[in-house]
């Protein structure tokens, strides 16, 4: 364990003294800059001291000098003094709250600025600023907790100090023996309460840490739902969530236990002084304490001292510990960010999507340890045996690359001996007992070939593209791109091998040029102009204000987004392009131009087709039909596949004819 990690662990388990030492200097500076507010607050509170003194003293004098002395008028006059003192509490409280805003609002503003600086600082410096999900909790929940706790603590601490001063001064003025009876049980309860403060702060700190960990796990799991479902790691994430929930519940139970101890201390401090005063009445009467003084002492206890003490202990036990923990988490030294959990799945990377290091969805599986199946030995089940599974033996000779293709991105020109894409007995099922989506699929795609994949919705076309892209690990078999197995390969290596274009095109805020050259940052302006010209993007470029104009994704249509993403894919140096219905929002003419341009670029093109024209343009067509797979040219597949004939008839608006 590193020193920094050990320090972080200590912060989570200390008893609060470390946090007090860390927070004391900034707290002193904050209060020193607001000395004027503190002085005005103290002046208003002095009036509260007088109010507390007059209430009990007025009751005592009304009894001794008025009613017991036979002077009812004088007794009523003293009760009127006590009543006026109570009524004067309203403007005093109003003045106190007016001054309190001068402390709480600057505190909240300062905490918000500090939380924003801490969150945005790493991002501005090029670090992973977007991964600090705890910043959301600090900016919203924790800042408001600090503000409300600070306000409550100032109010109750001020009220207790000045009210207790008035009540104790009143007890002393009535008879010194009253203090001898009241102070010991009062001090005992208060001392017992103070002993619980540090453990209570530690329990509060652990509860907050457990809450943050649970929220972070929930956010990561929600962002990675597709990968968790596709890769079968949902149960592991659920178990981790259950562990965090149990940890949060255990921390809450510990916090509740210390709250019970605090309640017991409150009972001792709140009820024992009254009981002691009742038991000491004969002794006090023997020392000359009058009936009015006794009644005044009870008034001080019940109306002033004990309510103020109860409020103080509640505030210190709840608001005080929360304030200490929350302030330490917001303005204390940064804790090292935990490394994200990586479930055993393949890295989710799509064409044009920025790589999110350390976020959910960027997950990788360990390298497969399955034995390499021989291509000739791949099983071929009888039709219908696989349910909805796809089984195929679709191989082809591998021609050399076209001589007329320009060399983009420095890719090797000679790939005659290596297949661009090769699947060897690939099986994929989403669960141990689930029917396989693909079953023992063999496929070989030559370099420079244009392959269209067709089939009904949900048959496994997108699954096939994800397997080839390496974002989904097969249940069995082997997937190779450019002769290299993709399962478990690092994201940077996968990005150099292929580009996966999903249906939802990704466009980010920035310049148009930034978006188009994202996959090839070093591209020259000539290369960029060639890509824009090839995809027919110039009208959109001119409408947006040029290649260096700022781009606002919300102002683009779905088709325009797809066209931008396709141009970005054309610019990529990767030798394999995978289009998963990436042209579905384009009109037929724009789709034809885009596919023809992408087919002319050096490399291999695999298209999940949603129009007949896409299949006709391809060199070969792979039909996934749920029981078997057929691969060949358009005419060959039209003759061999009833499903393809049905799909062709659907696309053409009538029954297809065999050629």
Image (tube, grey):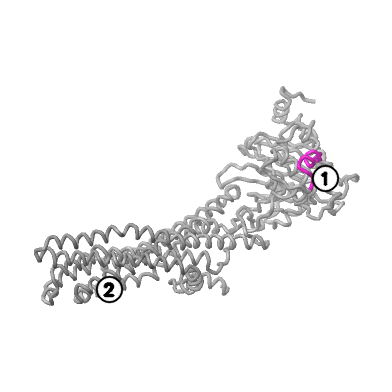
Magenta span covers which residues? 536-547
Is residue 110 depicted above or below 608 in this figure?
below
Q: Nearer the viewer, residue 581 or 636?
A: 581
Q: Does residue 341 appear to the left or right of 451 in the view shown?
A: left
Please tell me whether residue 537 belongs to the stretch shown in magenta: yes
Q: Nearer the viewer, residue 157 or 171?
A: 171
The answer to whether the residues at label 2 and label 1 have Cβ atoms under 8 Å apart is no
Query: Image quarter for residue 170?
Result: bottom left
Quadrant for the N terminus in the image: bottom right
Query: Image quarter for residue 599?
Result: top right
Question: Is residue 181 something that shows in the picture?
Answer: yes
Q: How many numbered discs sit on the rendered protein?
A: 2
Taking the view exactly as shown, the residue that stands out farthest to the left is 70
The residue that label 2 is drawn on is 188
- x and y, in percent, of residue 327 in the image: 48, 65
**Residue at screen point 70% across, 29% down:** 647
Find the distance from the CA under tag 2 to the CA under tag 1: 82 Å
The residue that label 1 is drawn on is 531
**Residue at screen point 59% across, 41% down:** 435
| Disc number for residue 275 | none
Question: Is residue 416 something that shows in the picture?
Answer: no
**Residue at screen point 43% across, 68% down:** 38
Disc 1 crowd, CA 10 A, few/some/many (<14, 14-19, 20+): many
Query: Image quarter for residue 391?
Result: top right
- x and y, in percent, of residue 115 in the image: 55, 61
Q: Does residue 580 appear to the left or right of 265 in the view shown?
A: right
Taking the view exactly as shown, the residue that stands out farthest to the right is 403
- Tag 1 or tag 2, which sits nearer the N-term? 2
- Nearer the observer: mark 2 or 1; the answer is 2
Quadrant for the C terminus in the image: top right
């Amino acid at each position: 364990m590193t020193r920094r990690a050990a320090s972080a662990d200590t912060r989570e388990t200390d008893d609060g003294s470390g946090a007090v030492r860390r927070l004391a200097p900034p707290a002193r500076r904050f209060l020193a800059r607001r000395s004027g507010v503190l002085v005005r607050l103290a002046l208003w509170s002095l009036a509260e001291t007088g109010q507390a003194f007059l209430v009990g003293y007025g009751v005592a004098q009304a009894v001794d000098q008025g009613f017991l002395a036979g002077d009812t008028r004088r007794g009523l006059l003293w009760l009127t003094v006590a009543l006026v003192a109570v009524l004067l509490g309203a403007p005093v409280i109003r003045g106190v709250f007016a001054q309190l805003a001068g402390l709480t609002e600057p505190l909240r503003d300062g905490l918000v600025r500090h939380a924003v600086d801490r969150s945005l600082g790493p991002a501005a410096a090029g670090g992973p600023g977007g991964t600090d999900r705890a910043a959301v909790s600090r900016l919203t929940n924790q800042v408001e907790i600090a503000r409300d706790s600070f306000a409550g603590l100032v109010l109750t601490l001020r009220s207790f100090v000045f009210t207790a001063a008035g009540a104790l001064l009143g007890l002393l003025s009535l008879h010194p023996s009253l203090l001898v009876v009241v102070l010991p049980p009062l001090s005992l309860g208060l001392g017992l309460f103070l002993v619980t403060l540090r453990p209570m702060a530690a329990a509060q700190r652990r509860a907050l840490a457990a809450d943050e960990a649970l929220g972070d796990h929930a956010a990561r799991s929600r962002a990675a739902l597709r990968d968790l479902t596709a890769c079968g790691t949902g149960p592991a994430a659920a178990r981790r969530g259950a562990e965090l929930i149990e940890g949060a519940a255990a921390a809450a139970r510990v916090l509740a236990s210390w709250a019970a101890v605090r309640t017991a201390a409150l009972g001792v401090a709140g009820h024992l002084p009254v009981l002691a005063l009742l038991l000491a009445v004969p002794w006090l009467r023997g020392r000359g304490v009058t009936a009015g003084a006794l009644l005044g002492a009870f008034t001080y206890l019940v109306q002033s001292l004990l309510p103020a003490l109860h409020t103080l202990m509640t505030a210190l036990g709840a608001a005080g510990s929360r304030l200490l923990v929350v302030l330490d988490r917001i303005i204390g030294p940064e804790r090292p960010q935990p490394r994200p959990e990586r479930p055993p799945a393949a890295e989710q990377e799509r064409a044009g999507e920025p790589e999110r290091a350390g976020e959910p969805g960027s997950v990788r599986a360990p390298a497969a340890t399955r034995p390499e199946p021989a291509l000739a030995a791949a099983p071929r089940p009888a039709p219908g045996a696989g349910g909805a599974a796809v089984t195929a033996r679709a191989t082809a000779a591998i021609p050399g690359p076209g001589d007329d293709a320009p060399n983009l991105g420095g890719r090797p020109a000679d790939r005659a001996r290596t297949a661009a894409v090769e699947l060897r007995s690939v099986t994929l099922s989403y669960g141990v007992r689930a029917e396989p989506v693909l079953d023992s699929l063999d496929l070989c795609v030559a370099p420079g070939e244009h392959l269209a994949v067709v089939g009904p919705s949900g048959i496994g076309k997108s699954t096939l593209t994800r397997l080839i892209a390496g974002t989904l690990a097969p249940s069995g078999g082997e997937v190779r791109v450019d002769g290299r197995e993709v399962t478990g390969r690092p994201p940077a290596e996968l990005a150099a091998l292929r580009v996966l274009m999903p249906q939802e095109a990704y466009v980010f805020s920035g310049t148009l040029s930034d978006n188009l050259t994202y996959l090839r940052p070093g591209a020259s302006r000539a290369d960029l102009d060639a890509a824009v010209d090839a995809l027919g993007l110039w009208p959109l470029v001119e409408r947006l204000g040029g290649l260096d104009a700022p781009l606002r994704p919300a102002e683009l249509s779905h088709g325009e987004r797809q066209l931008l993403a396709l141009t970005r894919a054309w610019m990529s140096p990767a030798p394999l392009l995978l289009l998963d219905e990436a042209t579905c929002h384009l009109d037929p003419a724009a789709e034809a131009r885009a596919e023809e341009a992408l087919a002319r670029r050096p490399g291999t093109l695999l298209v999940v087709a949603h129009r007949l024209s896409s299949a006709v343009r391809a060199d070969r067509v792979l039909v996934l039909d749920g029981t078997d797979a057929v691969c060949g040219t358009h005419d060959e597949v039209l003759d061999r596949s009833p499903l393809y004939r049905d799909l062709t008839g659907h696309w053409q608006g009538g029954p297809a004819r065999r050629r």
